[in-house]
Amino acid sequence: MSAGDNVAHVRLMTLLNVKNVHPREEDRPKAAERAHVYPKQGASSLSKRKRDAAPVSAPAEKHTKAEQGTASHASELHQQRMIPVIVANEEEDDDDGDENHGPSRLKSQDNSNENASIQVSDQQDAFHWHFDAESKALQGIDPEHLVWGQPEPVPQFGGAQLVRIHREASSQVPHSRPVSRPHARIWRAFSGKTEPTALQIEFLQYLGEYMDVWHSRVTIPEHAPLRQVTAMHAMSHLAKTRQRILKDNERLAKAVAAQVENDKADQDSVGDDELPEFRDQGFTRPKVLVLAPFRHTAKVWIESMIACSGCEQVEQKARFEREFSLPPGSIDKLADPESAHRYPEDHRHTFQGNIDDNFKLGVKLTRKTLRLYSAFYESDLIMTSPLGLRLLIEKDHDSDYLSSLEIVIADQLDVMLMQNWEHVKFVWERLSVIPKEAHDTDFSRVKPWYLDGQAPLLRQSILFSSLDAPEFRHLFHSLQNVGGRLRTTSLDEHHVPSMSLVTPGVRQTFFRFECSSAQSEADLRLLAFKDRIMSLLKKSAVTTSHTMIVVPSFFDFVRVEDYFRKLDPPISYTTLSEYSSTRDISRAREAFFSGKKSVLLLSERFHYYRRYIVRGAMTVIFYAPPEHATFYAELTNAPLTSRYETQAVVDAGDLQVWTLFCKYDLLRLERIAGAQQARHMLTGMNASYHFV
């Protein structure tokens, strides 16, 4: 498939997944459902959410005293009825899936987790229900024809949807759902120092049921708590898996010893007594894969896992600190107070620390030791970047260590989208595939559903991103986990459109072009740009000069540059892309600001990685709505700022912003103009919409 076909396919998925341009009732909870949102949110979440702006150019309204009182009261109610955490007994590991053993109340020595609402329950542990040799999650379904139920609204996390698999009425699956029961030792290490937050406990209930989870609106304050509880969930899964295998090893050894003793006692015995069968393994040892965009991100994940592992010793930690931190003597300008304030918060959060995107790391877990840099086939967990793993697979022509994964975590999908989404697709296509070689596998202990090729039906995927995109939707809807699916809605009720952050007085115009096919979208966009945008620019030399054109897609960026290169009569232009050197950047910015170059072509990836304030524009053109809605306001407001106190500031009324869009840009347009306004612009009679 060519690059153009890939782009067209992704944009087609946008249309299919958002149901064209019609309003999605599931994305907008009804009034009766909204009444249950606040009691389910923590105080920290409520205090930091803003109300949706009324006019798109008006600032967001503030909460009234009555609303603030309601939110505070709702937070108190939520704390009073905290969702209980059910913890598994550390010795609990019966062959029959804990039917003879119930969970016990975990008591910490310092009672620091007393408020975590740990309780006793007779419900089965979801770990055994989902991953036992005879998985109950596979009962009552047709693996070849999965049927999903209707989305159920979930009030948590600012609005979400839960979809469960449809099972046959005659199936023997009990009506009561299994519950999340973290491993006792892991939970004790996780909750021993700080009390889990309401967000973490709510999120754990869905993680622990082993359903696929996609949080598409992860904010900076929520990111660390979500990482920590997900790391705990992964370590709990590994501890339970290893505990089961070790116990079965002991039982098998005892059975062999007993058989030998019987053979010695009975000389006439031929030793044909069958040994007990234990189906507790996969083809290979790795059970958890964590995809992270940078070394610093991986470092944060590993540190969270070490903190809740309960291990007394961490091997190779000094090497890990050395390779995943900044080199000695280097200064992180995003962590330096003197320079960090010049960058937006989201940029500091993403690019702090070591941002090398080529790494891989194996982690082996025992009861008392966590070993870093273990070989993949000897590891329980693999921490890697999509690029690092792809390069390794292409070099060794081997990906069998991905055959038995039971949890896959992908953090910061929005960053991976800016890197190269093809790497993520390459890795995902090789998950849960029956291996080509045996790799010393004891097939007598491999679970039947591995042998039947049903591992994708039980593998849990946990996805985190700060925005919604068609690429993420396509990935999420391709998952087959019969445990269910939970994803947050595209926008929450308190979303602030980025248009409202633009300086008042700036003339903003949105030009719609019609497009009936995703395959032809790229060609029609370029044609609309030539006919509608360039025709307006060429009317006078004033409008042509000091024009900045922002192009989100690199493929479109190449096409637009090629168009300007062939223009007759020519228009002087310069470019800034993610591949521009520091020297080229300085020259291009100076040439555009001084007027030596009339047009500046700027890729969204350049602004994403560099975050320069580009001044000198009188006309800002968005070839398509930017993926990151904050860039719309940043790039629009940049010409209105002055670098020096003596420098004249451009008046807002002299700046104009033009944006080209079609129905395949709905998700991006919603973040810029708001959901209701975006749908009006896509379904209205007008071909252009003006805002001041």
Image (cartoon, rainbow, N blue to C red):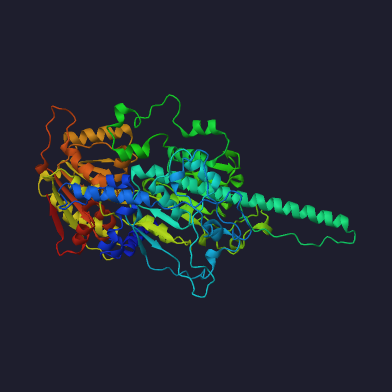
Q: Position of residue 514 (x, y in %)?
A: 22, 63
Horizontal side, residue 327 vs residue 577: left or right: right
Horizontal side, residue 507 vs residue 219: left or right: left
Q: Quadrant of residue 472?
A: bottom left
- Front one among 635 and 364: 364
The residue sitting at 31% across, 42% down in the picture is 608
- Which quadrant holds the N terminus? bottom left
Q: Quadrant of residue 676?
A: bottom left
Looking at the image, residue 401 lies above or below residue 25? above
- Front one among 394 and 287: 287
Q: Position of residue 14 (x, y in %)?
A: 32, 60
Q: Position of residue 59 (x, y in %)?
A: 16, 46
Looking at the image, residue 590 lies above or below residue 141? above
Looking at the image, residue 220 lies above or below residue 267? above
Horizontal side, residue 184 vs residue 300: left or right: right
Q: Is residue 192 visible?
A: yes
- Front one among 104 and 247: 104
